[in-house]
Amino acid sequence: MITQETLRASSTTRSKPLSPSRSTSAHVVHLEAVIHGECLELVVRDDGTGGAEPGRGSGLIGLVDRIEAIGGKLDITSRPGEGTTMDVRLPLSGPTAEG
């Protein structure tokens, strides 16, 4: 069962690269979604300018916080000139006792 928190975090993740204010140079966004056991795994990749860093006030730190709050994990790869890739793992059952 996919919880409301998982859906909220995944829809937020999908929308970030598509937002013109966040990635004005991206022309193409790829989204892959796969369920592995009790996790929803998302890969969101764009062809923008890259250089996104969660600690630089880009709004990504809030996304990381929301994903971690439900027991998920977000890895961001964003080399300047190479676009941005977000690898997201979201538990389908919501937060765990440890997370």
Image (tube, rainbow, N blue to C red):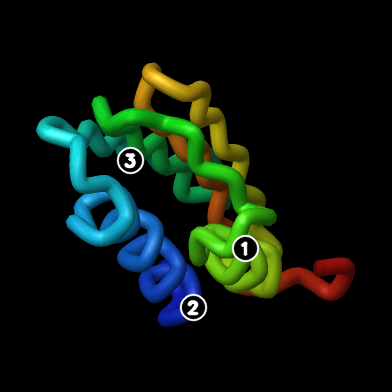
**Could you say where residue 28 lies in the image, as x and y percent from the top left?**
14, 31
Vertical relation: 44 (above or below) 63: above
> Which kind of residue does numbered mark 2 sit on?
Glu
Q: Is residue 1 visible?
A: no
Determine the residue positioned at 19% across, 36% down. Answer: 26
> Which kind of residue does numbered mark 3 sit on?
Ala
Name the residue tied to disc 2.
5
- Choose top left, top right, bottom left or bottom right for residue 45: top left
> Which kind of residue does numbered mark 1 sit on?
Ile
Name the residue tied to disc 3.
33
| Numbered disc 1: secondary structure | helix
The answer for how far apart the CA atoms under marks 3 and 1 are is 22 Å
Determine the residue positioned at 26% across, 38% down. Answer: 31
Vertical relation: 11 (above or below) 81: below
Mark linked to residue 45: none
The answer for how far apart the CA atoms under marks 3 and 2 are is 16 Å
* Mark found first going from the N terminus, 1 or 2: 2
Spot the residue most to the left.
27
Q: Can residue 79 be seen in this view?
A: yes
Left or right, 23 with reference to 43: left
Query: Relative to the observer, which residue lies in front, 13 or 41?
Result: 13
* Mark found first going from the N terminus, 3 or 2: 2
**Could you say where residue 6 lies in the image, as x and y percent from the top left?**
47, 69
Query: Relative to the observer, which residue lies in front, 36 or 49?
Result: 49
| Dot 1 crowding, Cα within 10 Å, few <14, some 14–19, many 20+ | some
Name the residue tied to disc 1.
61
Left or right, 84 with reference to 19: right
Query: Relative to the observer, which residue lies in front, 31 or 4?
Result: 31
**Could you say where residue 58 lies in the image, as x and y percent from the top left?**
51, 59
